Amino acid sequence: MVEIRFHGRGGQGTVVASKILADAIAKEDKWVQAYPEFGVERRGSPVVAFIRINDKPIYDKSRIYAPDHVVVVDPTLVEAIDITEGLKPGGMIIINSDRRPEDLPFHGKFEVRTINATAIAVKHKLGSLAAPIVNTAIAGAVIKILGLAKPESLATAIRDGIAIKPDDNIKAAREAYEMA
Amino acid sequence: MKKVIMGNHALSYGAMLARSQVISAYPITPQTQVVELLSEMCADGSLDARFIKVESEHSAMASCIGASVAGARAFTATSAQGLALMHEMLHWAAGGRHPIVMGNINRAMAPGWSIWTDQNDSLSQRDTGWMQFYCSSNQEVVDTVIQGFKVAERLMIPAMVVLDAFALSHTYEVVDVPDQKLVDEFLPPFKPEIRLTPADPRAFGGLTGSDHYMELRYLLQREMEKAPALIEETGREYEKLFGRYLGLVDPYRCDDAELVFVTSGTAGFTARVAVDELRASGVRAGNLRVKVFRPFPFDRVREVLAKVKRAAVVDRNCSYGAGGIFYQEVKSALYGRPGMPPLFGYIAGLGGRDIMVDSFKEIAADAMSKDRAEQEIVWIGVKK
């Protein structure tokens, strides 16, 4: 079982990212469960989503308290909350950032990978310049770094699940996949 | 076809595959996506149903009753305060013998205002005459809606398909969405013996004096008593076509158990994980997941619990002044029978507080340390 926690802000598509990823992973014949933190978060406020991945049916329906990996969709959250809370030793942090892993505070304690998903989203005109939608780029990086699914599976999941600019979203995911 | 869908959409797919003919509903968090998707299906023609927009849940149920009287297969969905507002119409639906199927997302009753899960909303409707099915996965949700219609229409008793807010309603899981052709084979069109039609005018629900009312209620109870066997029979028919069995209860590793959790809803699946971990640490635990609350599966519960050393009923609800509601039912199932195990009652997870594997370990530690229950309720995870 692999358990991943996502941190983002309301409006960035964090929950959609987890859903798209779940869809892509299910295409690899895995059992998967994805859900948002059960709240009423508003645009801009911190949001959390979870994914469980297993090669057998998943019975645990509780929240994830000790994730194997953490994905940070919004880099400003690092100053706002403790994104490493409960993260298992040796766990991976994948973060949307224009900085190098070694320049981030939790480098050394955990394995850190960065992907500049914001730049990719802006390049493909996803969302607005002020509020780019980075979820598909993040998803592309996550499947590569954690070896969760083929990029083709993710592309299909994006086409099925995202109504706005599916082609640009697929390109963004692919670009992040190649860069990660 | 395997799809990754949320629990709410599992209800929508169930209603679609059952070829519901009338959908009438009022949106409420956390149920909204159920009707959103159904309205889209009605709009794009993938579901040939009349979608009736209403101004309240009371009207939603009233229009489902009207549709059912006219011989249409009717579906609705609601949650918490919405279900409470329907209360009068729930009696009307069951008393009038209208086999409506309704999804209810378990959400805690206000106040304090909550959108998170517990079972007090649906369990408060215990005595309305509806069957109540509690689901633990999105797969069970879609399968239960389809089977629910079949059982409901055979008995002419409405059925409620219940799932936890967020823990299931908003959780995406892999669901094998049944094939429409096979569902059509399993579930024939709804053809009630008597229906309202201009060609054959009748009155429904008229004044019923004391010389007849009691017989109507006797018949409702008598038909309800047929439900357990019918639910199992229907489950076997479904299993032949789809390979999945629902039934009344789901015992897991109970046969040699020194402690069995009695559970329902999503906690009923989390309990399985706890059972495996407890067994790995030397405690012979088991889990009896109760899938149907009305009719209560007294026989099946007794059969399983007769073989175990002790049982811990875990309730995500409370009947204030009594205790856990499943606990009361299980107690009455065991009362007066020789050789039944001591029973312990726990309340956990109200208003969406998480029920975790560790919660079950805490319950196990408590139950294993006592010979008999020392109080009606042991609270788990409450801040004192």
Image: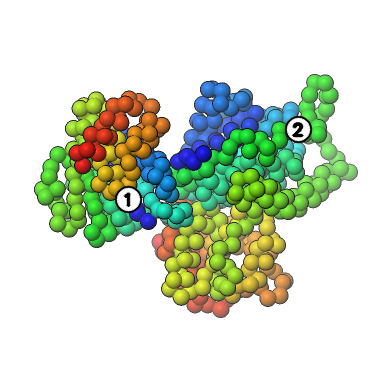
- Kindly indicate the quadrant of the structure image that contains residue B161: top right
* Chain of the residue that carries numbered disc 2 in the rendered image: B
Element on which disc 2 rests:
loop
Q: Residue at x 23, y 34 (%)?
A: A175
Location of mark 1 (residue): A4
On-image quarter of the C terminus of chain B? bottom left
| Mark number, residue B70 | none
The residue singled out by tag 2 in the image is: B191
| Amino acid of disc 2 | Lys
Above or below, B275 relative to B162: below
| Kind of element beneath mark 1 | strand
Q: Residue furthest top?
A: B198
Residue that appears at 32% across and 47% down: A148
Separation of residues labelled 2 and 1 (CA atoms): 49 Å
Q: Is residue B2 visible?
A: yes
Q: Residue B338 in the image: state x and y as whole percent.
A: 71, 75
Q: Residue at x 21, y 42 (%)?
A: A180
How would you rate the neighbour count of disc 2 (Cα within 10 Å): few for under 14, some for 14-19, many for 20 or more? few
Which one is in front, B354 or B317?
B354
What colour scheme has been applied to the protein in the rendered image?
rainbow
